[in-house]
Amino acid sequence: MAFAAHQVLRDHGLRPGVDIGLMGFDDTDFAQVFGLTSLHQPLAEIAQTLLLYLARAESGADAPSHGVVLDPLFIPRDSTDRSPSAQESATTYTAGNRTNDGDSP
């Protein structure tokens, strides 16, 4: 949807990141190519957590009493840089103290 909004803004002569900020979710290839700020969902961590809970359920463990919140990565790009000379950078900020190493649920 952010890619479509990017195209509509461009069609109306507006520059994402200069005239208006634009952010998407799931950090698709389009986001990277078109410089869209995005949230990168920790898919490996989500899968590991699901598999852990399934294995626990299969062994007879009680269901968890609460859900799990996994932090996405915020990836700023040109579409939220309000300076006219914005350079695309893939600087990645982690929320909290998590990393995107995919090694731990």
Image (cartoon, rainbow, N blue to C red):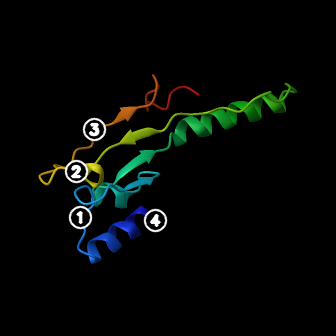
Q: Residue at x 39, y 68 (%)?
A: 5
Query: First in sequence: mark 2 or mark 3?
Result: 2
Specify the quadrant of the image occupied by residue 6: bottom left
Residue farthest top in this picture: 97
Towards the viewer: 6 or 19: 19
> Residue 91 vs residue 102: left or right?
left
Observer-side mark, 4 or 1, equals: 1
Query: First in sequence: mark 4 or mark 3?
Result: 4
Mark 2, secondary structure of its residue: loop
* Tag of residue 1: 4
Residue type at mark 3 is Thr
Q: Which residue has dot 1 on it?
A: 15
Residue type at mark 2 is Arg
Residue 44 lies, with reference to residue 101, above or below; the image says: below
Measured Cα–Cα span from mark 2 to mark 3: 16 Å
Q: Residue at x 73, y 32 (%)?
A: 53
Query: First in sequence: mark 1 or mark 3?
Result: 1
